[in-house]
Amino acid sequence: GGADRLTKRFGTNRVVAAALGVLGALLASYLLWDSEVTYWVVGTTFFVLAYALGLVMAPATDAVMGAVPPARAGLATAMNMVSRMVAGALGAAVTGSTLFTIYGSRVGAAVAGLPADVAAAAQDSVGAAAQIAAALPPEQGGPLMAAAGAAFIEAIGLASLIGCGIAVAGALVILRFMPPRHLPQDQETPVPA
């Protein structure tokens, strides 16, 4: 595919680093979003994000598999998959908890006049805030929904900076340490019994 052609032309390290740079820029662009962001902006961003992820994953997997002798391919595949799973779970946990911590603190003023249990539910979830806002009279529900939407979008932008920082740092590490092509293997390493 496209990643293969690009890595043959420019080298794995440059393709992966450039794709991570694009990911970082896209994640940072979430700071520019507001509650009125259009589907076309979100859809286009997610499309480019997915393409950039493909330009990271395919060449990186190829680099891992090309760095080991064929006799160790199973081990390399397992380590590659475990690394992705752990990183994905850790990234989702850290980013998600950061997002909801920021959201809860930003929406706090808008729920100050509500009963404590209702306010706590609205601070815990933007979905709960929307349901609560719909049940309130318009003069109370409208401002709550606007505040919850604005707080959630702001939280997404700020939490995405974690991913942005990791992507940019990863790009720099890859440019510095990853070879552009598979290193030749002089001889196959014997597999211990």
Image: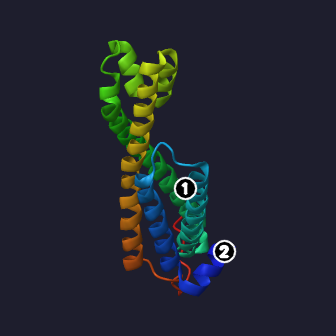
- Judging from the image, what secondary structure is the residue with disc 1 in? helix
Above or below — where is 40 with respect to 168? Answer: above
Q: Amino acid at mark 1?
A: Met
Residue at 51 percent across and 67 percent down: it is 192
Q: Is residue 178 visible?
A: yes
Residue with the mark numbered 1: 81
* Residue found at the far right of this picture: 1
What colouring does the structure picture have? rainbow
- Across and down, in percent, residue 30 comes to 44, 53
- Across and down, in percent, residue 38 comes to 57, 49
- Judging from the image, what secondary structure is the residue with disc 2 in? helix
Q: Amino acid at mark 2?
A: Gly
Residue with the mark numbered 2: 2
How would you rate the neighbour count of disc 2 (Cα within 10 Å): few for under 14, some for 14-19, many for 20 or more?
few
The quarter of the displayed image where residue 143 is located: top left
- Across and down, in percent, residue 138 comes to 48, 20
